[in-house]
């Protein structure tokens, strides 16, 4: 379980970006491995601080954590899967996936440096992954029962089809930069820090483009209107987040695309109340049926007609279980929750003389005897 990022950085939930960055800078210098050589606890604390900052510095990740807590990052590297997410991992982060090289480099970028060297050096050429995209859709409970498809229309950067994302005029990968060896970074020493800067020869790309693609101007990506059909699985729960890997914005110069996320909101239904995979339906039952027993007809969420037996003496507020007529279980194919009939009764406002007389006779027989005594 990830630690609370606000507690790790020692800031309030409503802390500003400036306060979060200030707290991060203070802690990352305190627990930096170069200041604590061989101290495993400091190294772990350093990772925790960077993981917390990775969440809080990103508006989407911070919003996901504020909304879902640890559940927002279940199933992957600081992931944003959300409750009931059948697609698994979400936003890429530090937890569980990155090595100390990545963390140190990101820590130095937080101080305004372009990187941190001396640890095997992954250059800027591998840091141009496309942005993740996020959308929200609200569906009915019946759509959640059957599953549905939601079409998202949006605009984003996509891989340039003229150069295949390479940014070159001939569409072929540009040759590796001879100065940085393809890392995209060159190093200089500043005290005990080895600071990385974008290579001036290739502008940090790791490859030297001599003639840029005329369509994308060497970036490898163009802006375009898109339409994406997202399949929402049957039984999806309110608050679930679906992930479509690689459907976010295109990366620069052939780098991987980001991911697309869809947050699901399920509307409350007028008839059915949801409780996990179970459904609750309030049904008005005549007084005579409650007293004498009988049957009632109900309609399930998938519009099936069912006959439910009512035992004599059934009390108002009791629940009758109809097995297997609840919501589909999104984690177990072919499995369904149950439907509970909550017994209610509507008191008639207009009675015939015959009905009134019958009720009066019943009430008379139900009254305690005048001869009865408390003693």
Image: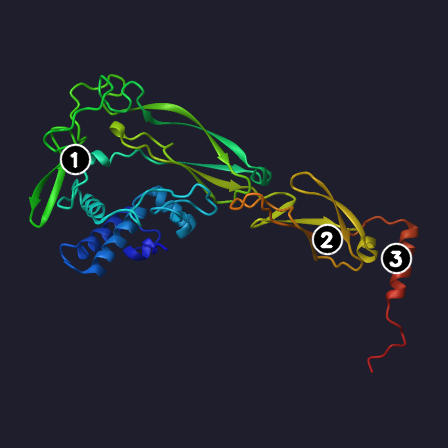
- As drawn, the label of residue 344 is 2
At numbered mark 3, what does the secondary structure look like: helix, strand or loop? helix
Q: Tell me residue 164's x, y (percent).
A: 29, 22
Neighbourhood count class around disc 1 (C-alpha, 10 Å): few under 14, some 14–19, many 20 upward: many
At numbered mark 1, what does the secondary structure look like: helix, strand or loop? loop
Residue under the image location 10 percent in, 48 percent down: 193
Nearer to the camera, 17 or 332: 332
Mark 2 or mark 3, whichever is nearer to me: 2
Task: State yes or no: discs 1 and 2 in contact (Cβ < 8 Å).
Answer: no
Structural distance between the alpha carbons of marks 1 and 2 = 71 Å
Nearer-N-terminus badge (1/3): 1
Residue under the image location 7 percent in, 46 percent down: 190
Residue under the image location 19 percent in, 45 percent down: 105
Q: How was the colour assigned to the protein in this rendering?
A: rainbow
Which quarter of the picture shows residue 32?
bottom left
Q: Tell me residue 319's x, y (percent).
A: 69, 55
Q: Tell me residue 290's x, y (percent).
A: 79, 55
Nearer to the camera, 212 or 24: 212
Q: Tell me residue 229's x, y (percent).
A: 47, 29
Task: State yes or no: discs 1 and 3 in contact (Cβ < 8 Å).
Answer: no
- As drawn, the label of residue 183 is 1
Nearer-N-terminus badge (2/3): 2
Neighbourhood count class around disc 3 (C-alpha, 10 Å): few under 14, some 14–19, many 20 upward: few
Q: Residue furthest bottom?
A: 375
Mark 1 or mark 3, whichever is nearer to me: 1
Structural distance between the alpha carbons of marks 1 and 3 = 90 Å
Which residue bears the numbered disc 3? 359
Nearer to the camera, 270 or 172: 172
Neighbourhood count class around disc 2 (C-alpha, 10 Å): few under 14, some 14–19, many 20 upward: some
Counting every numbered tag in the picture gives 3
Task: State yes or no: discs 2 and 3 in contact (Cβ < 8 Å).
Answer: no
């Amino acid at each position: 379980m990830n630690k609370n990022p606000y507690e790790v950085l020692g800031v309030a939930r409503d802390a500003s970006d400036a306060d979060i960055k200030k707290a991060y800078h203070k802690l990352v210098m305190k627990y930096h491995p170069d200041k604590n050589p061989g101290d495993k606890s400091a190294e772990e604390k350093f990772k925790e601080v960077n993981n917390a900052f990775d969440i809080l510095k990103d508006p989407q990740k911070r919003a996901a954590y504020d909304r879902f807590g640890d559940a927002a990052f279940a199933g992957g590297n600081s992931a944003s899967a959300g409750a009931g997410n059948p697609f698994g991992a979400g936003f890429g982060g530090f937890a569980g996936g990155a090595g100390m090289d990545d963390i140190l480099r990101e820590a130095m970028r937080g101080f305004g440096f372009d990187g941190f060297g001396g640890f095997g050096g992954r250059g800027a050429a591998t840091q141009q992954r496309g942005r993740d995209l996020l959308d929200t859709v609200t569906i009915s409970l019946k759509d959640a029962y059957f599953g549905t498809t939601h079409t998202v229309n949006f605009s984003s950067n996509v891989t340039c089809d003229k150069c295949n994302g390479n940014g070159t005029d001939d569409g072929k990968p540009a040759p590796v930069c001879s100065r940085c060896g393809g890392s995209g970074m060159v190093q200089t020493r500043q005290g005990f820090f080895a600071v990385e800067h974008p290579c001036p020869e290739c502008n940090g790309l790791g490859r030297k483009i001599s003639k840029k693609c005329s369509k994308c101007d060497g970036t490898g990506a163009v802006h375009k209107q898109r339409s994406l059909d997202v399949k929402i699985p049957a039984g999806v729960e309110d608050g679930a987040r679906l992930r479509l890997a690689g459907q976010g914005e295109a990366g620069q110069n052939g780098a991987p695309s980001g991911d697309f996320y869809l947050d699901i909101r399920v509307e409350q239904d007028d008839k059915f109340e949801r409780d996990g995979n179970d459904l609750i339906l309030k049904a008005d039952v005549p007084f005579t049926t409650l007293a004498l027993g009988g049957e009632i007809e109900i309609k399930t969420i998938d519009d099936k007609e069912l006959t439910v037996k009512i035992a004599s003496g059934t009390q108002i507020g009791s629940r009758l279980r109809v097995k297997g007529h609840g919501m589909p279980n999104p984690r177990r194919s072919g499995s369904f929750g149950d439907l509970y009939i909550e017994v209610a009764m509507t008191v008639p406002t207009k009675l015939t003389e015959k009905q009134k007389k019958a009720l009066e006779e019943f009430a008379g027989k139900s009254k305690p005897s005048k001869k009865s005594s408390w003693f």
